[in-house]
Structure formats: C-alpha cells, structure tokens
Amino acid sequence: MSETFHRKTPLTEILRPTSTMVLLVTKSDPFWTTKTISISTEDKTCPDFLYTIHHYQIKQILHNQNAWDLEENQTIQVCSANFESKLQNHKQYYLQGLSKSKNVQIYENEYHLENTTEAIIFIRPNWSANVLEYCVTGAFHDPKDLNPIQKILETKQL
C-alpha cells in the first residue's frame, strides 16, 4: 500500500532554482479544465490518466530566465506539480502493479485560489512533457506580497 508524505517547502527554496518562473496572473474563464491521456497496451487495460489544467492570463512577469517564451497578456496553461512523475506512477500502478510511497513537496500558505481572481504563481517548464507545471503543490501566493517577493528575487538572498 502506498502512502503520501508531505514536505513543507519554504518560499526561499521555491525561488532558489533559476528555472522557477514567477508570474502575477489573473484566472481565466474557465479557470480549470481536464484532459485525459489514453494509455494502451496489448496485454493490460489501464484507465485513462485524467489531469487538471489551470488557465491564467499573465499580468506581469516577475522572473523568467528560461527559454520558455512568455509575454504579458498571454494566456498560459499550468499542470499540477510533478505532472510527468504522476503519469509514470499511474502507468506503473495499472500496468505493472507497482505501488510506491510518494514524497510530495507543498507550499503551505493562507492564500487559496478558489476565493480570488489574481495570484502570484511559481511554475517551471517541464521540457520533456512540453508543459508548464507548478513548482510544488500549492505554488501560489497573495499578490499583496508582491514587493517582498520582488526584493527576494532582486537581492538573491536565498
């Protein structure tokens, strides 16, 4: 039987990698959609992999040192953190019968996306899956905290 272990991740650790993109965004309408990936083999049946995508419009790019081209007013789609490993775990569970315990990094804060239209999000490119994904679970922050985040990014006191 697999278990999920949550590891709290501080903001400074989320901002440390240069691959982290920090964006001030507004939620698009619809905010979320779901997609499926069909997984077929000749030997075994496997349910489709269902995942959620969040949709945003970029208001301001606070940090992006990636080759992933972003522009203000652009609409982006963001998958959950560790999208590709979740897909692999799904395949291993249904096709090979493997069940692994997972360590999940989370950013705990008081800000919830359900009750707002704007957020600061922390995302990264997943080049092999060609998607943007959250850096960790819960990788969003109150836009009122914009100035302290900008100072952290500018001073690099991580």
Image (cartoon, helix red, strand yellow):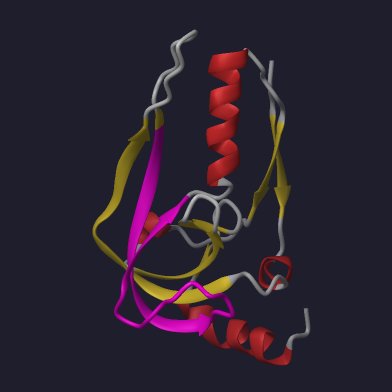
**Position in image of residue 52 (x %, y %):** 38, 43
**Position in image of residue 21 (x %, y %):** 55, 72
From the viewer's side, name the closer residue of 23 and 108.
23
The quarter of the rendered structure image containing the C terminus is bottom right
**Position in image of residue 109 (x %, y %):** 58, 60
- Residue in the picture at 53% in, 45% down: 83
- Residue in the picture at 41% in, 39% down: 51
Check the image and report above or below for 68 versus 90: below
Check the image and report above or below for 17 versus 29: below
Magenta region includes residue 117: no
Q: Main secondary structure of the magenta part?
A: strand
- Residue in the picture at 37% in, 49% down: 53
Check the image and report above or below for 103 versus 124: above
Check the image and report above or below for 152 versus 123: below
Q: Quadrant of residue 70?
A: bottom left
The quarter of the rendered structure image containing the N terminus is top right
- Judged left or right of residue 157, residue 90 is left
Q: Which residues are magenta?
A: 50-79
- Judged left or right of residue 95, residue 70 is left
Q: Looking at this view, name the residue that lies furthest to the top.
A: 43
Q: Quadrant of residue 4?
A: top right
- Judged left or right of residue 121, residue 55 is left
**Position in image of residue 79 (x %, y %):** 45, 51
- Residue in the picture at 43% in, 25% down: 39
Q: Looking at this view, name the residue that lies furthest to the left.
A: 29
Q: Looking at this view, name the residue that lies furthest to the right.
A: 157
Magenta region includes residue 69: yes
